[in-house]
Image: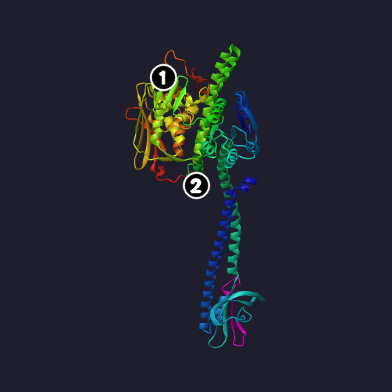
Amino acid sequence: MARLLLIEDDGDTAGDVLDDLRGRGHEVAWVATGPDGARSAREGGWDAIILDRMLPGQDGLGVLQDLRRDGDRTPALVLSALGDVDERIRGLRAGGDDYLAKPFVLGELAARIEALLRRPVDGRETLLRVGSLEIDLVAGTGRRGARNLDLLPRELKLLAYLMRSPGRIVTRAMLFEEVWNYRFTPKSNLIDVHLGRLRRKLEAAGEVPLIQNVRGVGFTLTPDD
Amino acid sequence: MTDVLRSTTLRWALGIALWSVLLALTMFAFIYWQTASYLREELAETLRLEVRAAAADPAATALRVDTWTAMDPHARHYGGFFAPNGTRRAGNLDTIPKGLPQDGDAYRVNATVVVGGRSLADEIWASALSLPGGGTVVIAHDTDDIDKVRVTTLRALGLGLLPMLALSGIGGIVLARRGRRRFAATEAALAEVMRGNLGKRLPVGKRGDEFDRLAANVNRMLDEIEHLMGEVRSVGDAVAHDLRTPLTRLRARLERSRAQAKTVAEFHEAIDQGLAWIDQTLAMVTAVLRIGAMEEGRRTAFAPVDLGELAAAAVDFFEPEAEERSVRLVLAADAEVPPVHGDRDLCFEALSNLIDNALKFTPSGGAVRVEVAHSSQAVEVAVEDTGPGLPASEHDKIFRRFYRAEMSRQTPGNGLGLSLVAAIAKLHGASVCVRAAEEGGCRFTMNFSKLIIVVNMPFAD
């Protein structure tokens, strides 16, 4: 699986993240300071870097900016303390590919890291197919097997996002960011309502369920073949 | 005692006493000077008249001089009638006093006088005139009368000064004591405030003097501080209270599950419920911190935001939720709304909170209407519902942190949604207000004034 570098000064947080990511089969190295992080990152060979915003020695964003200036494009996820309004924008501007505010749900971090890892292969496909499910983003149509699906534009977007990562968990926040293109934490039941309606359209009586709810984290689309 | 000595009032009292002594001294000096001049002038006039009378008739001069000297039993009258060679013909002066001009005016000179057969050197007031037939007449008076006035004045001053000083001192101490009592009451009140009793107020007298006005002002300041402290405390209390509720539930649930859960599924269920409650508390803590951060007014990531598009996305996002509640969610947006300078995520969050709030209070069958309108001055985003509405008295309060209107106590929520809206509006320099909607519910309005509408604004970021 993936080789990940975690740059995080808080031992407890680092321990939980290491356990969780290693439990998911990733190989994770951990360093605790900015300069150590910069050194490790430069050794190369990482599939993704997770770095905290505040680090002893050198600020996490400084480490990231240095890497980007030197042409290192390794996907990076920035972690930051809770409550900061502009942190995300600073994180993304410094060259971060994604951002997560503490405290976070471990499943959310894992899902985002996995999304980062597969981002390059997403491409610009407009015709997506997963199992018996098929959608055409240009025509705005969808089918399950022989049955035509009557999908609203936002439902098409939701489904496309799920279909681009079949079998993987996408969190509610990720879905919201992707489909509505805004960043905040909506009440979870609002996303669930959207997914519920989508599922009613996809899963007619007697059909195999496609979308599963992953408790406490998000949803996953399982191919039916 | 040192306290009394150090007190400002006593120093003032002492100062005033010294000042009155100084005044008295000046006054005595003036009175002495006036009295002495008067007496001197009076005496000079007498001497002038007398010498002129004596000189007028050379035949009677000797008699006149003797009459003058004899007239006075206390031997204060002097006179002399001298021959042209200086020999005394009458009177009790040995010689014509040296340096005495013989012009009939009165002068203060030293002379030797004969009193009771003894010659005495004395200072006298004298007046002399040359007689037409030769010779000189001198009429004089000793200076004791005038000197006595000085002595009397000084004695009076000395006698008067001591009681005056004593009275001033007593007056000063009485004043100092009174001031001291007033200060002591004020100091005691302040000390109590400093010990933490913010409800204590300074005593304010009925006189309405500067001191009372100062005390009244300090009291007003304390009112304001108490009000602010109360607000801070109520936020703190509310946070603590709202944190305790889910934590208490969580604790009870964990305890019960530990004792009763038998299967893994039951444990999972307990843990999931616990996680949900923890998420709820974390969301609240995050919201409080974010409101705090926004109230500090950081705005580094502003860019042009299209509120029309934003409202459309928000309505799209809430549509299924509205449908589940059988509430019509309607969007009415002007075309071509000019962009405002802001943070699109925060604007979306604010509008979401308003829509969420409106949906929560609108009964099924009702409607929520989202409007985006613009004028030359402003872009206005409004959310109107057909819910029960709010009493006007609560219109301002609902934007306060943790405030929950009386009727909304039973609905879920942490009382922070509208505070977040207010904080976001403030960060954007927008105003937010609520009023009764025409159809009975509430109408929340966010007004982005034209000052922050982007007109070819150079992108700072």
- What type is the residue that disc 1 sits on? Lys
x, y (%) of residue B32? 56, 65
Q: Residue at x 51, y 83 (%)?
A: B57
Image quadrant occupied by the N terminus of chain A: top right
Question: Disc 2 sits on a residue from what chain?
Answer: B
Q: Are marks 1 and 2 in contact (CB under 8 Å)?
A: no
Secondary element at tag 1 = helix
Span colored in magenta: B70-89
Looking at the picture, tell me which residue is in the foreground, B15 or B451.
B451
When asked about the image quadrant of residue B22, the answer is: bottom right
Q: Can you tell which of label 1 and label 2 is closer to the viewer?
A: 1
Structural crowding at the residue carrying mark 2, measured as other residues with C-alpha within 10 Å and reported as few (<14), some (14–19) or many (≥20): few
Q: Which mark is residue A66?
A: none
Does residue B44 show up magenta in the picture? Answer: no
Q: Is residue B77 magenta?
A: yes
Q: Which numbered tag is attached to residue B210?
A: 2
- Residue B455 is situated, as x and y percent measured from the top left of the image, at 39, 45
The reply to the same-chain question for discs 1 and 2 is: no
> In this orientation, which residue lies closer to the viewer: A176 or A39?
A39
Does the image show residue B333?
yes
- Decide if residue A184 is on the left or right side of residue B173: left
Q: Residue at x 56, y 43 (%)?
A: B183
Q: In the current view of this chain or complex, which residue is farthest to the right?
A: B118
- Residue A201 is marked as 1
Q: Nearer the viewer, residue B237 or A192?
A: A192
- x, y percentage for residue A9? 63, 34
